[in-house]
Amino acid sequence: MKKALITGITGQDGSYLAELLLEKGYKVSGMVRRSSVENYERVEHIREKLNFVQGDLTDQSSLDEAIKEIMPDEVYNLAAQSFVPTSWNQPVLTADVTGLGVTRILEAIRKHKSDTKFYQASSSEMFGKVQEIPQTEKTSFYPRSPYGVAKVYGHWITVNYRESYNIFACSGILFNHESPRRGLEFVTRKVTHTVAKIKLGLAKELRMGNMEAKRDWGFAGDYIYAMWLMLQQDQPDDYVIATGETHSVQQLVNIAFDCVGLNAKDYVVTDPKFLRPAEVDLLIGSSEKAKKKLGWTPSVSFEKLIEMMVKEDISLLNQNKVRH
Ligand code: NDP
Ligand code: GDR
């Protein structure tokens, strides 16, 4: 039985990945932070099947202990301060968790189980002010937020530990991926949740930031499968994971309102509060390498993804529930 450790198991991707690994027969452990309230909402349905260890990416000894205790065959480092706007408000914390945290976990692996296979959650935010269209594994980075800068560090330290210590370390450069489990502050979920509330008479307007920004949005369930595939190859490598399509925030909003038969123009209010000090205007990735080497392709279209999220939000609200 293979053993996996997932950092960030309570997050969107962590919950989907835990499901996949359980299905594949792994013994799955997840690292969780101590908190005054429990935060297992996304993994509640599989909680009994998981093993939890307490730890934090800012605390070396907890990472050392987690690796020594579990002796994992595979580690998926999904934990991060992952919300871009917060990274301007808490730039040092973001660098510590999202950047240096990667070195800490790599150090724990190097010291205690150097044959562990390692996955690093790199991001299309590293491309920032894009130097090439579409973005590939060879496109240079130009991050536009403290989050993006921290991810560039995490990416290169992963490459460095692979080259310095021969650790089987892979970096997945994943473009935006969403699901009904997406946190409420990210734009897709904010839109689908608010549209569902408007439809049910629970909200009157949708307050938005930059409507012109374009993203390459896919379904999280497809993307976590790519993470697993990377660690099953003979050689460690880095891969872009994307749909190859780009859409504006305005298009996202229009599709979500269309799903419930309402007109976006009647409800959207632009609010400067949601504008960023520096913006990533356009992202579109080419996952040709992943297609060729991993046999990976996305299965859910943008329209279907938004429809799935709107429907799920309506269904939850009808049961007086909110998934955070
Ligand atoms: P989420 O924000 O949903 O989850 C982040 C996870 O990290 C949570 O489990 C959170 O725990 C945990 N975490 C935060 N800080 C710490 C810390 N100091 N120590 C330990 N754990 C911590 O992110 P996603 O699931 O969306 O993303 C997963 C990873 O992929 C992240 O690294 C993200 O930056 C990256 N990424 C995401 C993309 C996307 O579109 N979703 C695209 C590209 C990269 P808690 O629940 O306690 O807050
Ligand atoms: P992003 O995702 O910054 O791309 O990072 P987010 O959904 O927050 O923003 C996408 C785009 O939408 C614009 N936008 C708004 N965004 C939010 N959150 N709220 C708004 O009201 C709003 N209005 C317009 C933004 O300006 C931006 O252009 C996500 C995270 O998951 C990262 O962790 C990950 O690395 C990248 O995706 C790939």
Image: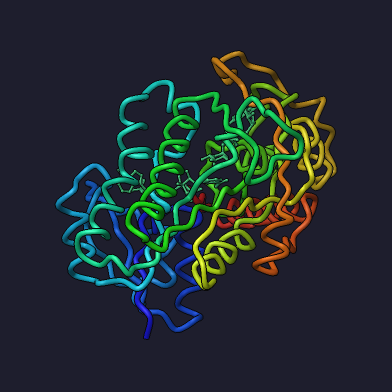
Q: Is 57 or 122 nearer to us in this picture?
A: 122
Q: Judge left or right: residue 52 versus residue 264.
A: left
Instruction: Find residue 223 and report its image quarter.
Output: bottom right
Query: Which quadrant, please, contains the N terminus?
Result: bottom left
Task: Give percent across and percent down for residue 194.
Answer: 64, 38
Front residue (pair 206, 220): 220
154 shown above or below 106: above
| Colour setup of the view | rainbow
Residue in the image at 70% along x and 20% along y: 269
Q: Is residue 11 left or right of residue 71?
A: right
Q: Residue at x 40, y 53 (%)?
A: 163
Q: Where residue 314 appears, x then y in whole percent? A: 66, 52
Determine which quarter of the picture holds residue 202: top right
Q: Residue at x 42, y 58 (%)?
A: 169
**Is 304 displayed left or right of 28 in the figure?**
right
Kindly identify the residue that appears in the image at 36 percent across and 61 percent down: 167
At which x and y percent is residue 16?
Answer: 51, 64
Q: Is residue 264 above or below residue 78?
A: above
Query: Is 142 rendered above or below residue 312?
Result: above
Q: Position of residue 316 (x, y in %)?
A: 58, 55
Which residue is nearer to you in this view: 9 or 102?
Answer: 102
Counting the numbered discs, the total is: 0
**Left or right: 257 in relation to 49:** right
